[in-house]
Amino acid sequence: MVKNEFLDKLEYLLSRVPEQDRKEMLYDYQEHFEIGFANGRSQAELIAELGDPHVIARDLLADYRIGRAEKDKTPTNMGRAIVATISLSFFNLVFILGPVAGLFGAYVALCAVSFGLTILPLAILGSYFFDYSYESFLVNFFVSLTSFSLGVLMSIGMIYVGKFFYNVVLRYIKFNVKVIKGDKAA
């Protein structure tokens, strides 16, 4: 996708907004491209940074409708603001909650694996008392050492992954609060 396709798609998706307001919204994105080009960035980088035009349009529509409801306190505008907020919540529920829950489940499973690898040497060395032989002892010792090392390394890695996951979810929640409040999100 190139700049013109991106802006045309965004303009089409914002066709329900009055022309003057739509031009103001699109001007911000045109300006974003101009500043990016001045800084030597490519169209692909700028489009990747901005994200999907459908998501941007939905957020802009939500901002617009909430802003209209704040200015003109009519039941129609209030209803549109409520629908915009619900549509954003529905998007989060359908498209975001599932992957986040899946990633969280995978994170918990990997934490359990790292914990299991860390305590596995106790079980391996405990089995030494039931099957005593010199070869068995050496095999068990090195398997225990390897398991413990992998468990500790994986635990350290999972701590960093957990911090990253926490920060990403927190930023996304803050972004949604901005969108719902009507602050500038893009």
Image (cartoon, grey):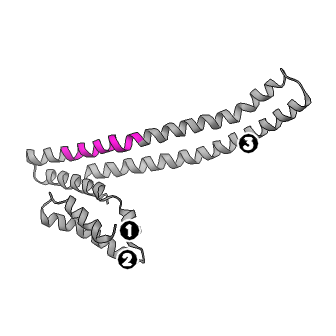
| Start-end of magenta stretch | 83-98
Q: Quadrant of residue 63?
A: bottom left
Instruction: Point out the tag, 1 or 3, that comes first from the N-terminus.
Output: 1
> Which residue is under mark 3?
149
- Residue 90: x and y, percent? 28, 42
Q: Circle 2 — which element?
A: helix
- Disc 1 and disc 2 in contact, CB within 8 angstroms: yes
- Apparent side of residue 101 relative to residue 85 in the rendered image (left or right): right
Nearest the camera: 123 or 74? 123
Q: Residue at x 48, y 42 (%)?
A: 103
Q: Residue at x 59, y 37 (%)?
A: 111
- Residue 152: x and y, percent? 69, 41
Magenta-colored stretch includes residue 85: yes
> Which residue is under mark 1?
46
- Residue 74: x and y, percent? 8, 47
Q: Residue at x 39, y 63 (%)?
A: 49
Amino acid carrying label 1: it is Leu
Residue placed farthest to the right in the image?
134
> Which residue is under mark 2?
37
Amino acid carrying label 3: it is Ser
